[in-house]
């Protein structure tokens, strides 16, 4: 859930404030003695990077009104006392807002309360796993008096990232879903990233129980659209399990439901679909399209499962199905254009030739899909594929292959483009510098929204490299990412610079530049 600055115009802390009333003369009572502070939280155990919802309550128990600077004033004094339980280390943490804010006053009348929601992890740094006691502290202007809440005890648990899936790398808002195998039992976990100045991991949430080997996928709205919610789905056996998460609502209880799928080794074609809507109160419908093998070679099908929010549980319904005269793909991806037209591209072998296909989603049960073979390549062995939608609804793709005969093979990237007007265009082939005697342990292809690709590669010896389609150079990753065995993926800062989304023990998941540094903190 993203918490916008406007949601916290009260944020913070009257406990942090400078008062505008005159300091008391000797012998006079200070009305701030009557200020009582209370800090509450919706949960006390959460993941590193998760953003719990806190409520700050200030109560005037005296007989006089208390006048204080508004909490969002830059010259307020906002403090938290943080005690690490295991070591006993105590720190005071304060994060001031911009100093050029115009002072604004609030008044708390006798026996009245002032209450506001607090984005706690935006105020204090608690990324390392452990147990902490946190209290909110208000100091008077001369530091002679203070009002402090009772501490709340928090436990931050580590997580491990398995089977990370990113919904898109098209914009600065990137959503990921993965299996947290460190949880007992393992948890489907949602992460939100901001690939921008002062960006990084924004928030993280658990979405349901599963086993550590599952592959969860997430929804994406039509091209250039926005969605306040997210559908998440994964396959366990022959069942599709699914849940919905709402951004910006108080009730985010995730109900995991399931539906039995037709036989045929079902596999989700990512990403899922969700309607465009900014209002979290709108029940956004979604859908998944599933690949199913047939009983005979080249007799496969694609099955649509519609998803709908409901109370107390979400609903899934089997919908359109289309027959596909092709073998199970080596790579496949769903694309929803800005007008909500849904297409699938996939790579499959046809008589030992690697071919790129396109087919629209079925609109009814038993329909025959208009399967188009877009490109065919001879003597090319599939390694990896990737694609993205351009802002004009073009599909930009790249296919990594081992090309040529056995005695003279090379690692090549085939860059292609498809749109409704120009149809398919193979833009170019690029030979990548790679020792053909060296096996490829893992490969990921990402494509910028203007069509320039990037490739993340490693050998079986876990030496990670990145090839950049902008300068057409292969680059080594710095330590500790050069030989990491943890989850690693690519995204684009300013839709251009390659950045790493990388898992880390304990602190969770981070966004780093290729030199290992953080995203820039200033414009």
Image (tube, grey):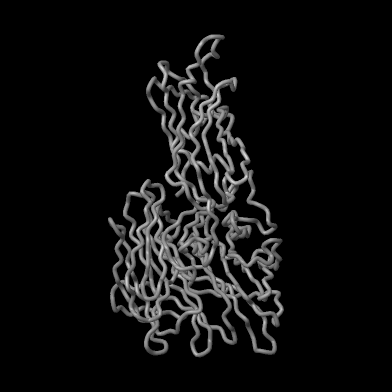
In the shown orientation, is residue 97 left or right of residue 323? Answer: right
Q: Is residue 280 left or right of residue 9?
A: left
Q: Position of residue 510 (x, y in %)?
A: 59, 55
Instruction: Name the residue rendered at 40%, 77% in the picture.
Output: 266
Residue 23 vs residue 241: left or right?
right
Where's residue 399, x and y in %? Answer: 57, 75
Residue 421 in view in this figure: no
Query: Where residue 322 sits in the image (x, y, percent)?
Result: 34, 78
State the image coordinates of residue 37 (x, y, percent, origin top left). Answer: 46, 30
Direction from residue 323 to residue 414 in the image, left or right: right
Between 281 and 391, the one lying in front of the other is 281
Count of numbered circles on the image: 0
**Is residue 33 visible in the rendered structure shown here?**
yes
Q: Quadrant of residue 321?
A: bottom left
Q: Closest to the observer: 478 or 85?
A: 85
Query: Which residue is rendered at x = 50% and y = 37% of the image?
Result: 151
Q: Where, quadrant-wise, is the C terminus in this rendering?
A: top right
Residue 53, quarter of picture: top left
Looking at the image, is 479 positioned above or below residue 343? above
User: Relative to 196, is 378 above or below?
Assistant: below
């Amino acid at each position: 859930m993203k918490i916008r600055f406007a949601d916290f115009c009260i944020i913070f802390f009257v406990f942090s404030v400078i008062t505008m009333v005159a300091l008391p003369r000797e012998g006079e009572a200070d009305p701030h003695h009557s200020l009582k502070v209370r800090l509450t939280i919706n949960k006390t155990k959460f993941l590193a990077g998760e953003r719990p919802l806190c409520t700050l309550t200030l109560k005037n128990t005296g007989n006089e009104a208390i006048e204080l600077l508004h909490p969002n004033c830059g010259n307020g004094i906002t403090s938290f006392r943080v005690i690490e339980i295991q070591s006993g280390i105590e720190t005071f943490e304060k994060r001031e807002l911009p100093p050029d804010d115009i002072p604004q006053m609030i008044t708390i009348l006798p026996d009245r309360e002032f209450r506001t929601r607090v984005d706690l992890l935006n105020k204090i740094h608690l990324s390392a796993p452990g147990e902490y006691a946190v209290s909110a502290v208000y100091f008077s202007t001369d530091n002679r008096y203070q009002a402090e809440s009772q501490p709340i005890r928090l436990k931050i648990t580590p997580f491990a990232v398995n089977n990370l899936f990113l919904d898109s790398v098209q914009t600065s808002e990137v959503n990921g879903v993965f299996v947290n195998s460190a949880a007992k039992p393992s948890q489907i976990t949602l992460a939100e990233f901001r690939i921008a100045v002062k960006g990084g991991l924004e928030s993280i949430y658990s979405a349901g129980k599963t086993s550590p080997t599952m592959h969860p996928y997430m929804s994406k709205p039509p091209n250039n659209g926005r969605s306040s919610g997210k559908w998440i789905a994964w396959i366990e056996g022959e069942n599709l399990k699914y849940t919905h998460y709402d951004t910006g609502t108080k009730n985010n209880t995730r109900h995991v439901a399931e539906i039995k799928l037709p036989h045929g080794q079902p596999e989700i074609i990512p990403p899922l679909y969700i309607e465009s809507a900014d209002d979290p109160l709108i029940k956004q419908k979604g859908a998944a399209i599933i690949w199913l093998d047939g009983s005979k070679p080249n007799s496969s099908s694609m099955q649509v499962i519609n998803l709908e929010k409901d109370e107390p549980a979400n609903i899934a319904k089997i919908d359109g199905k289309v027959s596909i005269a092709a073998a199970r793909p080596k790579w496949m991806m769903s694309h929803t254009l800005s007008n909500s037209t849904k297409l699938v591209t996939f790579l499959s072998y046809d008589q030992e030739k690697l071919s790129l296909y396109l087919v629209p989603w079925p609109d009814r049960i038993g329909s025959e899909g208009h399967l188009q073979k877009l490109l065919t390549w001879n003597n090319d062995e599939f390694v990896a594929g990737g694609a993205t939608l351009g802002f004009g609804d073009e599909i930009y793709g790249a296919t990594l292959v081992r090309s040529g005969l056995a005695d003279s093979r090379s690692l090549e990237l085939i860059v292609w483009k498809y749109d409704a007007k120009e149809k398919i265009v193979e833009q170019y082939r690029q030979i990548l510098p790679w020792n053909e005697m060296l096996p490829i342990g893992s490969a990921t292809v990402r494509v910028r929204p203007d069509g320039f690709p990037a490739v993340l590669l490693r050998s079986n010896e876990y030496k990670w490299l990145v090839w950049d389609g902008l300068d057409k150079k292969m680059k080594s990753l710095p330590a500790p990412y050069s030989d990491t065995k943890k989850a690693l993926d690519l995204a684009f800062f300013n839709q251009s610079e390659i950045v790493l989304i990388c898992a880390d023990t304990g602190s969770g998941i981070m966004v780093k530049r290729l030199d290992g540094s953080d995203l820039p903190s200033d414009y």
